Image (spheres, helix red, strand yellow):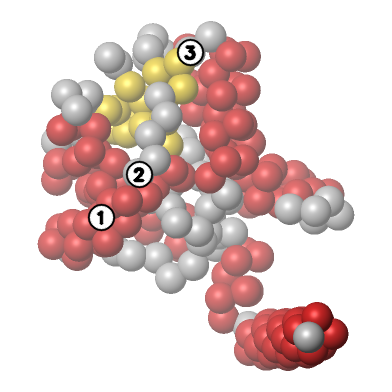
Amino acid sequence: MKLLLHMCCGPCSCYPVKKLREEGIEPTGYFFNPNIHPYKEWDMRLKTAREFADKVGMEFHADEHYRLLDFLKKALPAEALPNGRCQMCYTWRLEETARFAAEHGFDAFTSTLFYSIYQQHDLMRRTAEHFAEKYGVVFHYEDFRPGWQEGIDISHDLGLYRQPYCGCIFSEEERYSREIRKQRKKENKAKKRARLEREAREAREAASNIRGGC
């Protein structure tokens, strides 16, 4: 099977490539990630993806255009919708992967997105299946998440650059903003307090029912 593997980055590709090769599948890497910003981060991840492909002897293709303006045109309107930005991001990258696979004679495609334990797995799967049907190419589904730690270990062994945040400028802010971290900490405390109060109320109601039954 001639398989196109969408690569989010070099480290995320470590385990999926190993797993696919163990199954007798030789993937071809494809880097298309207009979500990554700023420019230096995007450039570093592109270089690292190429470095990884060279080190493991994998064919590699890349869209080498930095697309900040294109991303913002799509992301800002999507912010008004629940989960809109991330859904837009999955849709854009998976559609372009399916299109590239169909136009370049690949039998199937998949993505290292399915390696991440932080992404919305089921949503991505439905999205990939949709574009597989649209472009007439097979979506090769695999859940790569069980190899999460193994992939991290391989990336360290290969000396690959490991990024500190998801990719887009929004996730960069979420990673480094003290204000956002403070707000999230406050929200988590409120959720914990509400959960404890609910559990205490349920315990009182259960005790009251027991006494009433006696």
Which of the 4 image quadrants contains residue 134?
A: top right
Mark 1: secondary structure: helix
Nearer the observer, disc 2 or disc 3?
2
Kind of residue indicated by mark 2: Phe
Q: Quadrant of the C terminus?
A: bottom right
Nearer the observer, disc 1 or disc 2?
2
Which of the 4 image quadrants contains residue 4?
A: top left
Residue at 22%, 24% (x, y): give it.
25
Q: Residues within 10 Å of mark 3 (few under 14, many from 20)?
A: many
**Residue 3, percent across and down?**
33, 22
Is residue 20 rendered to the left or right of residue 101? left
Q: CA distance from mark 3 to mark 1?
A: 27 Å
Q: Residues within 10 Å of mark 2 (few under 14, many from 20)?
A: many
Q: Which mark is residue 144?
A: 2
- Mark 3, residue position: 137
Q: Are marks 3 and 1 in contact (CB under 8 Å)?
A: no
Q: CA distance from mark 1 to mark 2?
A: 10 Å
N-terminal of the pair, mark 2 or mark 3, is 3
52, above or below 197, in the image: above
Q: Residues within 10 Å of mark 1 (few under 14, many from 20)?
A: many
Q: CA distance from mark 2 to mark 3?
A: 21 Å
**Residue 74, percent across and down?**
75, 44
Q: Are marks 2 and 3 in contact (CB under 8 Å)?
A: no
Residue at 56%, 24% (x, y): give it.
129
- Mark 1, residue position: 151
Is residue 16 rendered to the left or right of residue 133? left
Kind of residue indicated by mark 1: Gly
22, above or below 163, in the image: above
Kind of residue indicated by mark 3: Val
97, above or below 35, in the image: above
N-terminal of the pair, mark 1 or mark 2, is 2
